[in-house]
Amino acid sequence: MEHLYAPWRSAYFTQDIQGCVFCHITKATKEDDELGVLFRDSHCFGVMNRYPYTPGHFMVIPYTHSDSIETLEPQVWEQMSRHVRDGVRMLKEVLHVKGVNIGMNLGVCAGAGIAEHVHYHLVPRWQRDTNFITTIANTRVMGVPFEDIYEKLKAKAPEYFQINL
């Protein structure tokens, strides 16, 4: 068995969050920088993924705790979708990505890590961003510190997300 030393993940295992982590972020408005929140709007917010597939990976999450997109109010779904579109534009213009994977994993069997609270993923992609280490060692290498990407995107977020609070 291969072991990868990743001390930066210790906060994930030791944090004392009871219940849904997205509901915690919803309520913890004074901790936005610590939690990686990019923007907050009336029905949803954007937050960086702490354990990204690629640098700049973030999520758009409704404040409504639901495991079903079918039960979301139309205005919630529309606002989320608009912010996904705006997020793609921001990733292309700010991080100069060449593509973006957009997705939702609805339910545990679909691969959702946090299945109880629906959320969109926006995963930046670059030409040749998967290399031999991913293929051979089943390991991803992040070449940019999380905080640097977060600060860059957070600074530009007001230019991209029209907020309707």
Image: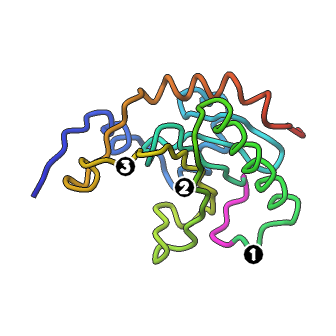
* Distance from Cα at disc 3 to Cα at disc 1: 34 Å
* Distance from Cα at disc 3 to Cα at disc 2: 31 Å
In the image, 3 versus 136, the foreground residue is 136
> Could you tell whether 13 is left or right of 73 in the image?
left
Residue 33 x %, y %: 58, 26
Q: Residue visible at 34% across and 41% down?
A: 14
Number of residues whose C-alpha sits closer than 10 Å to that of mark 1, classed few (under 14), some (14–19) or many (20 or more)? few
* Distance from Cα at disc 2 to Cα at disc 1: 20 Å
Q: Is residue 30 above or below residue 12?
A: above
Q: Is residue 67 magenta?
A: yes
Dividing the picture into quarters, in which one does residue 69 lie?
A: bottom right
> Which numbered disc, 2 or 1, marks the residue closer to the eye?
1
Type of amino acid under label 2:
Cys
| Magenta stretch: dominant secondary structure | loop
Q: Residue visible at 36% across and 36% down?
A: 142
Number of the label disc, if any, that sits on residue 20: 2
In terms of secondary structure, where does tag 2 sit?
loop
The quadrant of the picture occupied by the N terminus is: bottom left
Q: Is residue 82 above or below residue 74?
A: above
- The residue tagged 1 is 70
> Which numbered disc, 3 or 2, marks the residue closer to the eye?
3
Residue 149 x %, y %: 52, 28
Number of the label disc, if any, that sits on residue 130: 3
Type of amino acid under label 3:
Thr
Type of amino acid under label 1:
Glu
Q: Is residue 29 magenta?
A: no
> Which numbered disc, 3 or 1, marks the residue closer to the eye?
3
Residue 140 x %, y %: 32, 46
Q: Residue visible at 55% across and 34% down?
A: 35
